[in-house]
Amino acid sequence: MILRDPVCGMPIDSEKVKLKAEVWGKLYFFCSENCMQSFLKGPRIAYFSMEIGIKNEIPTYSGGLGVLAGDTIYSAADLRLPLIAVTLVSRMGYVKQKITPDGEQLESPDEWNPLDFLKLLPSIASVQIEGRDVKIQAWLYEHQSPTGGVVPVFFLDTDLDENAQEDREITNYLYGGDDEYRLKQEIVLGIGGTRILKLLGFNVRKYHMNEGHSSLLTLELLKENTANAEKVRDLCVFTTHTPVEAGFDKFSYSLVQSLLGNDFPLDGFTQYGGEEKLNMTLLALNLSEFVNGVSSEHMEYSKRLFPGYYLRAITNGVHSYRWTCQYFRELYDKHIPGWANEPELLVRVSEIPEEEVWDAHVKAKGALMNFIKERNGIEMDTNVLTIGFARRSTEYKRATLIFSDIARLREINNLGKLQLIFSGKAHPRDTEGKVLIKQIYEYMSQLKNDVKIAYLENYDMDIGAKLTSGVDVWLNTPKPPLEASGTSGMKAAHNGVINFSVLDGWWAEGCIEGVTGWSIGPSPAESISEQERRRREIEDLYNKLKYLIIPSFYKERDEWITLMKNSVAKVAYYFNSYRMMLRYITSAYLI
Ligand SMILES: *Cc1c(COP(=O)(O)O)cnc(C)c1O
């Protein structure tokens, strides 16, 4: 059997190999002593994330943040980067969604069994919570890339017999419970995670905090480094994903004190985490050498929130192979071999014959239509212009903007038929998010004789992949500046699906009007009132549908396919997680 060295990627014949090492029950083969030592003892990047979407059957993610973490791991493995990842096991997952016929969201736990996919490791760390010793074990998931690279992911778990019942439940619910529950989770993630990596013998060169949930790790590092903040800063990288102050996790110092007791001196907290409350974003910001936002827009906006800090931008990306559907993979394999490990090559898509691009698209669209028929019993038509919208159902994402003027939508639909497909879960406590789902169901019934509309229950990564490859147009209408980046539109671009979106987050960088897709509403730089912005967004939404999108789709198929190709060659070639990881390596990890 031919295997690959996990460090350099060199192919190795397992019959002849001399250098091998067993790590957690798995054998690794090496081309040289150097590679072996580097694998066993070399410096690592430790990537901490409250949620990770690594596999659809492991429901430990709620949305874009987790999917991004998954794509980061996929890319790091492909690039054979020495990265390890830490998250919580979240045994009850995020939330499973059902929707009643009148649009009511029903929720249940999304329980999964770690034993099905992960290996339990023997090391046990502990943290002090309310004076109790809380034991933490870790489950291992190894993400293996075809290039030989491997990224271990550690899922932290407090469900041990030795722990008190309430502590056993800390790692059950992703984003469940109150402030106290959340802070306990963040203690386990940040402090517990750092300790377990130490027990496992890792030599960590950088701690990368994906959002502020893990920023308590900085306090553990302060402790390890005799309160030398310079040293800690040198070890830390922080990526912020939230563009509004209200989105930051904050905890009262009385809660912090009651949970952590005297294990960590309070002046450390107030010095770096804020005077009034412990602000997890501020804590990470003050103790990280490298801090970045996830798009240029987001960086500019965050600078205003944090004057005096040096913030950089590394725009998010998606893992090209993971998010490209079977039909487009085949198309790229045929015409652009090597694209999967070098997505820059997608610029060459312009050379692919138009019929082949269209044919791949129609197949992907057909697969989606079959899926919808199976799931929802709705028969959609592959010849009809189909618009997709799927994301967490929360107010700022404005899923109902396209229904702002029903009469106009009907009129446009008479000009050229439309089909709409929605999907998305609301957080159990997000009342407004649930109302949005209900409203979509109401519009569905109002429009039932005109426009076919489907709402796919229980949005997950599989549905995400089907939708972002099977529709014609990917719609996104967040309220600026709240979409820090957004990534589903990048998945769409990998499949020749055209973006039609508000100029917020990544699309402010990706949109070349009429070339890579279309914008909705004015540039974020334009300072106008909220009402005026909304009015212009709605105008653009309907006018561009009526005068540009429908005529081009139905009457100018060649022009349409050029746009599809541009979506790949001018969007996907750049907005992928390889480019993103290379930026993290050169700007953050290697400094
Ligand atoms: C890609 C993806 C997201 C993120 O999409 P956004 O456009 O950033 O909202 C969220 N959830 C799932 C299941 C996804 O696949």
Image: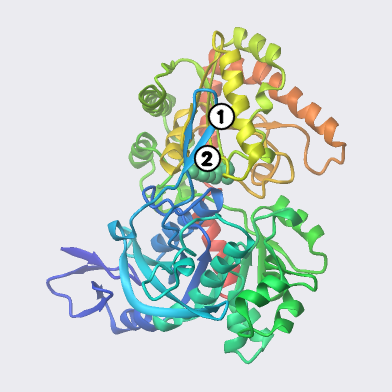
**Mark 1 crowd level (few <14, some 14–19, many ≥20, 10 Å Cα):** many
Q: Nearer the viewer, residue 78 or 187?
A: 187
Residue 355 at x, y percent in the picture? 41, 23
- Above or below for 526 versus 552: below
Q: Nearer the viewer, residue 232 or 357?
A: 232
In the picture, the quarter occupied by the N terminus is bottom left
* Relative side of 284 to 473, left or right: right
Q: Residue at x 58, y 53 (%)?
A: 316
Q: Find disc 1 in the rendering and name its residue.
A: 563
Give the CA distance from mark 2 to mark 1.
10 Å
Q: Nearer the viewer, residue 326 or 107?
A: 107
- Above or below for 578 versus 371: below
Amino acid type, residue under disc 1 in the picture? Leu
Whether residue 313 appears in this view of the structure is yes
Indicate which disc residue 151 carries.
none
Outermost residue, left side: 15
Q: How many marks?
A: 2
Q: Residue at x 69, y 59 (%)?
A: 248
* Relative side of 531 to 447, left or right: right
